[in-house]
Amino acid sequence: MSNAVSALNGASFKGSVAIKDVGLQGMITLRGDFKSAVLAKAVKAATGTAVPETGQILHSTKGSAAWMSPDELLLLVDYTNVDAVIAKLDKALSGEHALVVNVSDARALFEIKGVATRDIIAKGSPADMNKDALPVGMIRRSRLGQLPVAFWMDDEKTARMVCFRSVGEHVFTWLKNASKKGNLPKYHT
Amino acid sequence: MSTRLQSGGRLIDRTKQIEFNWNGKRLNGFQGDTLASALLANDQMLMGRSFKYHRPRGVVAAGPEEPNALMGTGEGGRFEPNQRATTTEIYQGLKSHSQNHWPSLEFDVGAINTKLSRFFPAGFYYKTFMAPSFAWKHVFEPIIRKSAGLGKAPTHKDEDSYEYFYAHVDVVVAGGGIAGLQAALTAGQAGATVLLMEQAVDYGGRAITDGVTIGGKPAAAWIKSTLAALKKLPNVQMRTRMMAAGVYDHGYLLGYERLTDHMGPSDGPRHRLWRIRAKRIVTATGAIERPLSFAGNDIPGVMLAGAVRDYIADYGVSIGDRTVVVTNNDDGYRTAIALHEAGLNVPCIIDPRGDLDGELPAKAIALGIRVENKSAIGKVKGGKRVEAVTLCAQAGEGTTLEEIKCDAVAMSGGWSPVVHLWSHCGGKLNWDTDTAIFRPDPARPPLGADGTGFVIATGTANGHLDAAAALKDGHAAGMAAAKEVGFKPARAAAPIAASELEATMLPVWSMPQGASYALKSKTFLDYQNDVKVSDVRLAAQEGYESVEHTKRYTTLGMATDQGKLSNINGLAVLADSLNADIPNVGTTTFRPPYHPISLGSIAGDAHNELFKPIRKTPMHQWIDENGGDWEPVADWRRPYCYKQGSESVEEAVTREILNTRENCGLLDASTLGKIIVKGPDAGKFLDMIYTNMMSTLKVGFCRYGLMCSENGFLSDDGVVARLDENTFLCHTTSGGSDRIHAHMEEWLQTEWWDWKVYTANITEQYAQIAVVGPNARKVLEKLGGMDVSAEALPFMTFKDGELGGIKARPYRISFSGELSYEIAVPASQGQAFWDMCMEAGKEFGIQPYGTECLHVMRAEKGFIMIGDETDGTVIPQDLGLNWAISKKKEDFLGKRGQQRSHMTDPNRWKLVGLKTVDPAKVIPDGAYAVDGTMRENGMHNMIGRVTSTYFSPTLNHSIAMGLVQNGPDRMGEVIEFPTIGGESIKAEICDPVFLDKEGARQNV
């Protein structure tokens, strides 16, 4: 897979925040019954985490699990490991009604870093970006400008944002524009 | 004349001189001046011409309510019309000009209209231009458009940038006067998050200018200490130059922040539109002074009394040496006193009231100012500037008792609370007879989702016109807001404000009481739209009773100021004319925005490259660099063709078709929708979604299917592949993937929620590349990695494997009629795979092809295209697709719809091929076929229309498909398609499959 490239091929920009295309990230959509012990065990094996509660994202050294909807999770694992993880999940869930599908290449992933991170996202997302509404450990599915995105805070200064691959360039341009020189709202800082 | 005073002006910095340009003149002002105060300081009272009569007009107010002093500011890409001089701060190099005059502000030809004013009565548009009917469009409208109107539309693209900002906050306080500051402090100290916004440059509202004391000290000291206290609270944010523009359902509020208007062109966004979710909104928006209605009340030099003292106190500007004050309330006396204290002459205070026993009149009399009670202004004399007023009895008809020379008039008709934000979302008002104001009814606030009020009006905006009550109310509002959002404010007493006690005002809607028609025809209610007292009276006479109808008939309150000065006066005149009570006449509806906001702020950042998101496939850049001629397909861009050298589009398309049919073509088909459907009930589900049977599809095989809406109309189509026993992959059209995925989810979530089916839209996971043409197999065999032979991978099957070292899934499906593989590879390796195909295909004549080539090839094969052959009114039966409609299935979406009588009507237009008699003539897109007979209305009887039409280079013949009445029964008939040029194109009805009906080319 030496010829595999992410949507923005690692592009970066430094404005009032630093923005970069994180590169290839393994992503798996898992749909199923969250109450199922089999599913919980399969998630644990895949990402090292429990099944997240509503709005949560859980991390371990192995990967992350994010709540997408009442029956959908987004699992983050190493890009090179995706096929193997999917095979294991499929096997573990063979007796369950569940869907496991690779969406790694269908997405772009950005990192936004800097004290103004919450202010920059709040220029485009109607989500509540107050610290108590989106603390580290929560994920929001929302929009940025005209496009659907999901994001979470890795720490107080760092956000990660997922969007569809085909509009990765638009989201990157949007983020660059929002963090250009000039007035910052300075609402969350 | 108006001039700068020796001293004073708390908002200006006299050490910083600013040069600006107005109407081509270089003028000077000070840092902190508004355009209005700077013009007044330069003795420029005349600031514009009126809308209808082109009357000379001067500035009337000192704030956003200003109706007259509208300017064009900036130039080129930064030009903006209709900017209020009173809210436009000057900066070095500002360029501005007055509006609505020709050839100049001083001499305006349009002023002839004022002489013709009796020909422009209320509703004159409706009365004058009724007939003849053609004349409106061709005669009247062009003339009116030219002569009416204010500023000119900008001619350049806006060079500035704008942005949104979303905020969630417990309490928004709109207005930073003393009530708003106190409300913010009380709510903030209780622990609520607070966003305080003030539209002006500074906090404090009128308190400083009006000499209010708080806790025994001047208001300015209290404001300073309160701001310091607010700044210390981490949960409170404060913004100036930010206006609450509108209140909407669920505590949604628009805030309009002007970031760089006061600096001129600079880095960063010019305006920021805040979109705020607030749990409670406290409106501390103050009040606006009302003009008085006397003849000549629009002559430059007649101003609101409060504005006159604002110009003295805030900008150190005098509007005239001799100013007559006319007032029906005690507040107006503050202006007389302020003028006197500034060393200016007040020849007379004219007051229609009898007893003048308030503190302020007593003070004015003590200062030696002449006060005339029970009096009125008969009329103002002057043209471009006030010269004198006539004094008369308020009770009479205007007989002149005395003429008083003066160069300015300060008028006060009382104050109207700014109830706009309270009312935007349904807050109701009560009429307070004592103070003659509409004030918010706290029992009927706008209601939120939980059924409780979410707006709290406070201070002057809540009808408390004196400072003491306003400040106390601000504290109460802060307490209430904090409690309602879940905090427990500590019990603390509100600070105590004090100002002179004011006696009762006297509502005066016409001055003098019995003014003649001639006087009323010079008495303006709405300055910006030139509506006079006589116009409203005429409307009432003609039967207009509803205030909303009168508004539209007379245009009262319909200008860009939305009647901030005129509404109450206008409806009082209407009530008087109708002999009704003011509350029974009521107000017109208050709608957002409170004050005009820039279109740029509404657009936000959605301009230039961010105007509209474009979806790009993994090969987008390569296509762009290799001659791709883009066309929009849904939100995607796809190449229409690839131009080589100086080739035209048509030449490129022809080359691509012939090359693909003879050698090999490469198509980026990544935009096709791909939806995974999985679960034990997946087959049953797809049997409902598609018209044909999907549950019987074997693993490893592909089947073409049709999807219909519930009404039976064809909605989408595509190839379904069965990946395993429980899993299907459904291809949709490029534009259909999101819509069809939502359609599937809707049925699963609302109707068949107990079916065990999951879906996932994985459209973008794959780059899908079609290798098409007689040499297609040779190209893939050269890449190697899996067996792609006819035996291993027959037509309408797929296989998972590897090609050129990349994980690949080739599908043997064909939309061109040629030997064809559509190969799905991971999107991140799409470009790599494309490059390999181009390289491997070199020796086999491979060339990329675009969408037009795709379209022509599918039309040669008679394949339908969703959006060409369908338009939302077409059912599969119309297209001869009965073979794809299962007769075995009990039900599918659209089945019952297709059984309705109109759908089974044998006369429905049906799909046929059309072969032009002249092989070189291509029928225009969308052309209609006629049978030569006429309808009653003189139109041709139409018997069909073209849905797809091309020149086929393969057949060297023009081909088309179309829907024709009884088409399939009329094979061989020639029908006519008249074209716009008058020519009629003849075409023979034929089978829609023009090429290789047996499918020999694709099935190899």
Image (tube, rainbow, N blue to C red):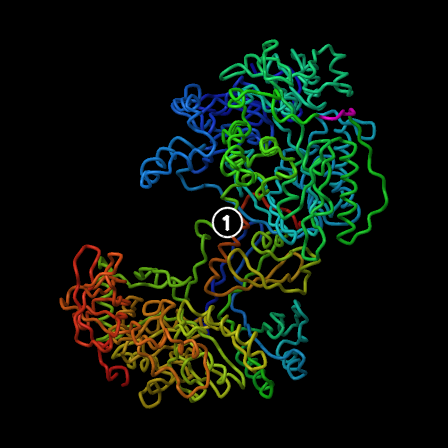
Q: Is residue B502 magenta-colored? A: yes
Residue B765 locus on image (x, y percent): 47, 72
Residue B19 locus on image (x, y percent): 52, 23
Query: Which residue is most to the left?
Result: B918
* Along the viewing direction, whichever of B217 and B535 lies nearer the viewer: B535
Check disc 1 and give the amino acid type.
Asp
Most common secondary structure along the magenta stretch: loop
Q: Is residue B880 left or right of residue B305?
A: left
Can you tell which quarter of the image residue B923 is in? Answer: bottom left
Decide if residue B138 is in sight here: yes
Can you tell which quarter of the image residue B182 is in? Answer: top right
Q: Is residue B475 magenta-colored? A: no
Q: Which residues are magenta?
A: B500-505
Q: Which residue is mark 1?
A: B605
Residue at the image position 50 percent from the left and 62 percent from the top: A10
Decide if residue B69 is in sight here: no
* Along the viewing direction, whichever of B532 and B829 lies nearer the viewer: B532
* Callout 1 crowding tier (Cα within 10 Å): few <14, some 14–19, many ≥20: many
Residue B56 locus on image (x, y percent): 48, 22
Residue B904 locus on image (x, y percent): 35, 77
| Chain designation of label 1 | B
Element marked by disc 1 = loop
Q: Quadrant of the N terminus of chain B?
A: top right
